[in-house]
Amino acid sequence: EAQLVESGGDLVQPGGSLRLSCSASRFRISAYYMSWYRQAPEKEREFVANIDPTGRRKNYGDSVKGRFTISRENNMNVVYLQMNNLKPEDTGVYYCSAPLLNARGQGTQVTVSS
C-alpha cells in the first residue's frame, strides 16, 4: 500500500514562507502525477497544485498562483511545496496525494497568523 508522509507545517506570520515536504514509500513517485490539497476548518477541500511525473508540467489553484511552487525529486521520492508570501487564508491542513493510487497522507498543519 502506497504511503505518503507530509512535513514542514508550522505557525508563520503573514508574508512569511514555508516549504512542505511529502515523502513517499512503497511506491516510486516517478511514474505518477503528484498533488497538494488543503482543507481549512469548515471549508471544502481545495486544490493547491499538481506536477507531472517529469516535473515539467505544473498546475496551480487560482488562490496560490504566483506564490506557491510545486517541485519533485524523483530520485529521493519526495515532492515539495514552496509557499511564499503566506496569507491568513492559506491556513489549513495540507495534504499530499497520488491520485491514481488513491493515496493521501495524514496532512501537515499550516497556520498563518500574527
Image (cartoon, rainbow, N blue to C red):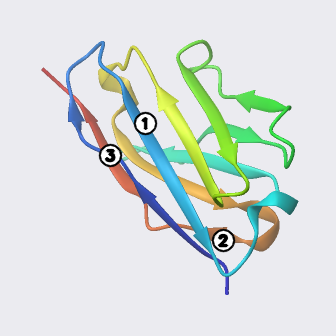
Q: Of circles 2 and 1, which is in front?
A: 1
Image location (x, y in percent) of residue 69: 60, 27
Labels 3 and 1 touching (C-beta < 8 A): no
Between discs 3 and 1, the one toward the N terminus = 3
For residue 15, which quarter of the picture?
top left
Residue type at numbered disc 3: Gly
SS state under label 2: strand
Q: Nearer the viewer, residue 23 or 2?
A: 23
Furthest residue to the front? 75
How far apart marks 2 and 1 lie (CA) works out to 21 Å
Q: Which mark is residue 106?
A: none
- Determine which residue is flagged by label 3: 9
Q: Residues within 10 Å of mark 2 (few under 14, many from 20)?
A: some
Query: What percent of the width, then of the height, locates residue 67?
Result: 53, 16
Residue at (33% x, 35% y) in the render? 91
Q: Would you place residue 69 above or below residue 32 in this image?
A: above
- From the image, tell me which residue sits under label 1: 19
Name above or below for residue 36 compared with residue 84: below
At 87% from the left edge and 61% from the top edge, which residue is drawn?
A: 31
Secondary-structure class at tag 3: loop
Which residue type does callout 1 highlight? Arg
